[in-house]
Amino acid sequence: MSSDDFNASALKGQRGLGRIARAAGYSVAGLRAAFRGEAAFRQLVLLNALLVPLAFALDVTRAERALLVMACLLTLIVELFNSAIEAAIDRISVERHPLSKAAKDMGSAAQLLALAALASVWGIVLL
């Protein structure tokens, strides 16, 4: 099958502003699902609700403030990926399997590293 025979964009549906609006709706739905269904995501939202305003209250440069905020947001991004991996694995099967365990453990490890990055950035900027 040549690239002329298959047009992947034809499978995407709407184009232009309609597509952007639908994508935004899916994103909001994902945030709601994470907030409602994932305690870890809610905990990180609370942590971000404390740290992000603090980043704006501190006497730091704009670049340092940007790093502080980005480190905070990174934890939320990684938790969304981690939760998505867990949901996909659980959808496939709830039975124990070494590959399922490895996927979930790697998602958890990514979050651990994001939290270590958060602590490092805040520690370096504040010290």
Image (cartoon, rainbow, N blue to C red):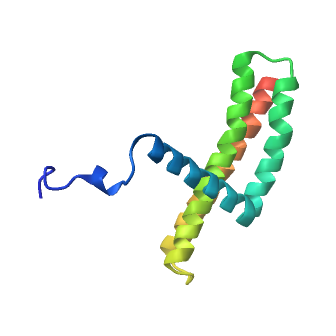
Figure label count: 0
Q: Where is residue 58 in the image (x, y as percent from the top left)?
A: 86, 22
Q: Say left or right for 2 vs 113.
A: left
Q: Residue at x 80, y 34 (%)?
A: 52
Q: Position of residue 23 (x, y in %)?
A: 51, 49
Task: Decide: is 36 above or below 78.
Answer: below
> Is the C terminus in the top left, top right, bottom left or bottom right quadrant?
top right
Q: Residue at x 53, y 71 (%)?
A: 89
Asked if residue 117 shows in the view, the reply is no
Q: Which residue lies furthest to the top in this view?
A: 61
Q: Where is residue 1 in the image (x, y as percent from the top left)?
A: 12, 59
Task: Decide: is 55 above or below 104.
Answer: above
Q: Which residue lies furthest to the bottom in this view?
A: 95
Q: Where is residue 71 in the image (x, y as percent from the top left)?
A: 69, 36
Q: Which residue is drawn at 69% across and 58% down?
A: 32
Q: Say left or right for 44 vs 26.
A: right
Q: Say left or right for 17 vs 111.
A: left
- Using the image as rendered, state which of residue 114 and residue 33 is in the foreground: 33
Q: In which quarter of the image is residue 87?
A: bottom right
Q: Which residue is drawn at 68% across and 40% down?
A: 73
Q: Residue furthest front?
A: 18
- Using the image as rendered, state which of residue 103 and residue 62 is in the foreground: 62
Q: Say left or right for 73 vs 92.
A: right
